[in-house]
């Protein structure tokens, strides 16, 4: 069975189950905590360790989790899907965000982003996507020299100085080739 299909089915099931229990926000919070803690556990989860040990590890990764999320973890281990937990949780989070009009954007800047820039990008993103809420994940990368790179869904706006320098270099090389 396709891994994307599995992730979507389990993600949808978690969204529906958490809604039935009235624990949508708690499950979303727990899924974020689990994703943050998952990387060091992935090797153990993909090994043939006893299922009880895997469930203990997953539960220890997110202490104070809600009942719906705990039931979900039991289901994942019971059906031996713990190796796909990362994709399942990402699928669930995408379903959760889409249902609530939340869009995640990624901003890369050379230095710390100003509140003014963040507010303007948030307003523009809401306007163009129709989202109710925009979550902007900010990353600092001095290699872009200045400006910013902004990604929303499958769209990317590269207003970095590094890209402008690359474009000038290409244009210069193309123009000089015609002369020679």
Image (cartoon, grey):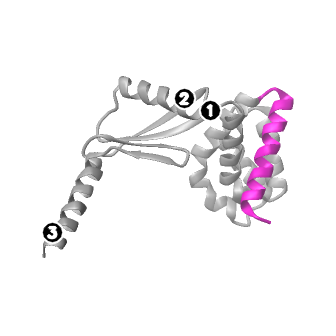
- Magenta residues span 1-23
Report the residue that reaches farthest toward the front: 179
Label 1: how many residues lie within 10 Å, few (<14), some (14-19) or many (20+)? some
Q: Which residue is mark 1?
A: 102
Camera-near label (3 vs 2) is 3
Does the image show residue 83? yes
Does the image show residue 63? no
For the point 26% across and 42% down, the residue is: 146
Label 3: how many residues lie within 10 Å, few (<14), some (14-19) or many (20+)? few
Residue 5 belongs to magenta span: yes
Report the residue that reaches farthest toward the left: 180
- Depth check: 21 or 129 in front? 129
> What's the CA distance linking mark 3 and mark 2?
43 Å
Q: Which residue is mark 3?
A: 176
Instruction: Indicate the position of residue 132 as horizontal and vertical percent values.
Output: 61, 26
Q: Identify whether 37 is placed above or below 42.
A: above
Q: Between disc 3 and disc 1, whose residue precedes?
A: 1
Q: Which residue is mark 2?
A: 126
- Depth check: 153 or 174 in front? 174
Instruction: Indicate the position of residue 87 as horizontal and vertical percent values.
Output: 67, 53
> What's the CA distance linking mark 2 and mark 1?
9 Å
Q: Between disc 3 and disc 2, whose residue precedes?
A: 2
Instruction: Indicate the position of residue 61 as horizontal and vertical percent values.
Output: 64, 43
- Depth check: 126 or 17 in front? 126
């Amino acid at each position: 069975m396709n891994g994307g299909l599995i992730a979507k089915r389990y993600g949808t099931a978690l969204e529906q189950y958490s809604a039935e229990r009235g624990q949508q926000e708690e499950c979303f919070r727990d899924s974020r905590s689990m994703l943050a803690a998952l990387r060091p556990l992935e090797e153990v989860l993909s090994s043939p360790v006893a299922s009880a040990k895997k469930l203990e590890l997953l539960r220890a990764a997110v202490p104070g989790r809600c009942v719906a999320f705990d039931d979900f973890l039991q289901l994942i281990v019971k059906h031996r899907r713990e190796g796909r937990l990362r994709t399942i949780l990402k699928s669930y989070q995408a379903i959760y965000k889409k249902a609530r009009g939340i869009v995640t954007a990624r901003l890369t800047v050379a230095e710390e982003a100003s509140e003014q820039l963040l507010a303007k990008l948030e307003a523009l993103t809401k306007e163009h996507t129709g989202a109710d809420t925009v979550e902007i994940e900010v990353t600092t990368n001095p290699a872009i020299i200045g400006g910013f790179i902004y990604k929303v869904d499958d769209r990317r706006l590269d207003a970095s100085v590094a890209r402008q320098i690359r474009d000038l270099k290409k244009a210069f090389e193309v123009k000089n080739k015609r002369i020679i």
